[in-house]
Amino acid sequence: MTDTATIAKIEMSERAAERINAILAGEAEAKVLRLSVDGGGCSGLQYAYTLETEPTADDIIVERDGARLVVDSISAAYIAGARVDYVEDLMGQSFRVENPNATASCGCGSSFSV
C-alpha cells in the first residue's frame, strides 16, 4: 500500500490480489484494476470496476502481492476503511467491498448508501 492508501485505510485481501493478478495476466494493456463509486443501483451508490493502463496522479493505489487496485480520491471518501475481497459462493464469483461507511445495502452487495 502506498502512503495515500494508508491514509484512506483501504485494504485488499489475499484472494482479491490473486484474482486481480489473474485478470491482468490475460490483458495485454491493462495494469491496474480501478474501483470507483458511482451514482445508481437500488441503494443510491454502486461499485464499479474497470481495467486501466495506468493510475492517474490523484489515485490512491492499494498494492498487495504485485496486484494494484486504484481508487480515485472522490470514491475513496465513500470507502475509507473498506476491505476489498474476492468471494466465490452460491451467488457466483465477485469482488466484494466490506464498507464500514455503508448504512444500507442491497441484497446483491453491489449497491449501498451512506
Image: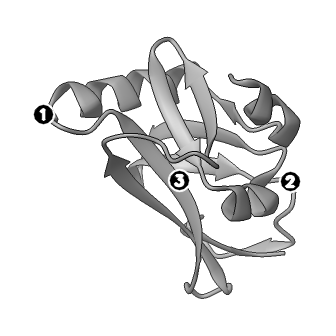
Between marks 1 and 3, how big is the CA–CA gap? 20 Å
Front: mark 1 or 2: 1
Front: mark 1 or 3: 1
Q: Nearer the viewer, residue 51 or 102?
A: 51
Picture residue at 31% right of the left edge, 42% below the top = 53
Q: Are marks 2 and 3 in contact (CB under 8 Å)?
A: no
Picture residue at 45% right of the left edge, 23% below the top = 67
The correct choice, above or below, for 61 with respect to 90 in the image is above
Label 1 sits on residue: 28
x, y percent for residue 104: 80, 75
Q: Earlier in the sequence, mark 2 or mark 3?
A: 3
x, y percent for residue 69: 52, 37
Residue type at numbered disc 1: Ala
The image quadrant that residue 83 belongs to is: top right
Label 3 sits on residue: 35
Q: Is residue 87 left or right of residue 26?
A: right
The correct choice, above or below, for 102 with respect to 72 in the image is below
Q: Earlier in the sequence, mark 1 or mark 2?
A: 1
The correct choice, above or below, for 44 with respect to 53 in the image is below
**Residue 65, numbered label:** none
x, y percent for residue 46: 58, 73
Q: Dot 1, how many residues are within 10 Å of its Cα: few (below 14), some (14-19), or many (20+)? A: few
**Residue 100, numbered label:** 2
Q: Nearer the viewer, residue 102 or 32?
A: 32
